[in-house]
Amino acid sequence: MILYKEITGEYFEVLNIESSDKEISNHIPHKSPQNSLTILWFLDNDSILETDGIRNHISKNEILFITDLHHVKMLKTGSIRTMRFNRAFYCIINHDQDVSCKGLLFYGASTLPKIQLSKSQINLLNPIFRTISREITIADQHQLPMLQLLLRQFLIHCTRFYKQQNLSATSTVSNIEIIREFNYLVELHFKKLHKVKDYAKIMNKSSKTLSNLFSQHSNKSPFQIITERKILEAKRLLCYGNLSVKEVSYNLGYNDIQSFSRAFKNQELISPMTFKTKCMGKNAKHLGKKVSLNYYQTKDICI
């Protein structure tokens, strides 16, 4: 079911995909909304995704959070609940005070954010999703605010679950806010700002303060987050774009191609050119067989 307001542009979509024999392209409109966010809730162990070139077998009751910046292919589709919404319907940046998922679920991770639901967590989310599926069929003056309210509740629960599974149990609210803000700033500025001190300055913190905080409450350092985000972008540009290795290096702000190649190989264990060659061969093999869930495009985050 889809809610679309042509004049104001609000877009909200809810799908229940049941068949593992059909590609997800059969369930997704031909005109997907730009600047949209997608939530995928997997109900069995039958789905296989390729995310930015990495093949993933998805577990039952795992939820993934996807932006238009992720390049995701559904290689095998099991039973999935999906929600997709654009910024006109609900902008998580403008409503960050309400849901606090910026920098955690969306816009702030070099890996695809995900949570694994427990039985109690499933019992919390199931009624919300069922109510959303019912409300999207009721076309009256209360439909839009009701769906926005339900989506907000769903995101708040998911943000709590993500914190429980990915952050230290000793993390305070203020520390989590700093981590979220750093992650989001990296998403905005990783092409131009490459040092921890650059972000520390924006946040009115010292580099040492950020490093100490991340060592206590996260499994990655601030420098790792910056580097991994740059290399992820490099992989996307090399695999799904038409840029040369030299052009990708320049695009990401490296001083020379040698520095870029060294950084890429340190993380991926192969050179950028080898990666591009392998990826282009894989894309040619699957051309016309599989469909991308999202299309790679320039970032346009609502602020």
Image: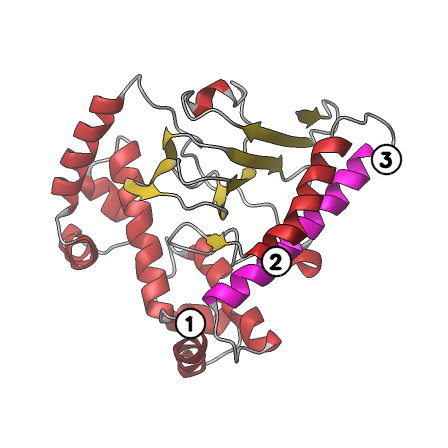
Given this view, does label 1 or label 2 mark the residue nearer the observer?
2
Can you identify the residue that label 3 sits on?
Answer: 142
Q: How is the image coloured?
A: secondary structure
Question: Label 2 is placed on what type of residue?
Answer: Ser
Screen quadrant of the N terminus: top right
Sequence-wise first label, 1 or 2: 2
Say left or right for 131 vs 118: right
Q: Nearer the viewer, residue 48 or 226?
A: 48
The number of numbered discs placed on residues in the rendered structure image is 3
Q: Nearer the viewer, residue 250 or 86?
A: 86
Residue 189 at least partly seen = yes
Q: Is residue 265 magenta?
A: no
Question: Label 3 is placed on what type of residue?
Answer: His
What mark, if any, has residue 120 been given in the picture?
2
Kindly state the secondary structure of the residue where label 3 is placed: loop
Percent position of residue 104, x then y: 52, 58
Distance in Å between CA atoms under marks 1 and 2: 25 Å
- Range covered by the magenta-colored residues: 143-166
Distance in Å between CA atoms under marks 1 and 3: 41 Å
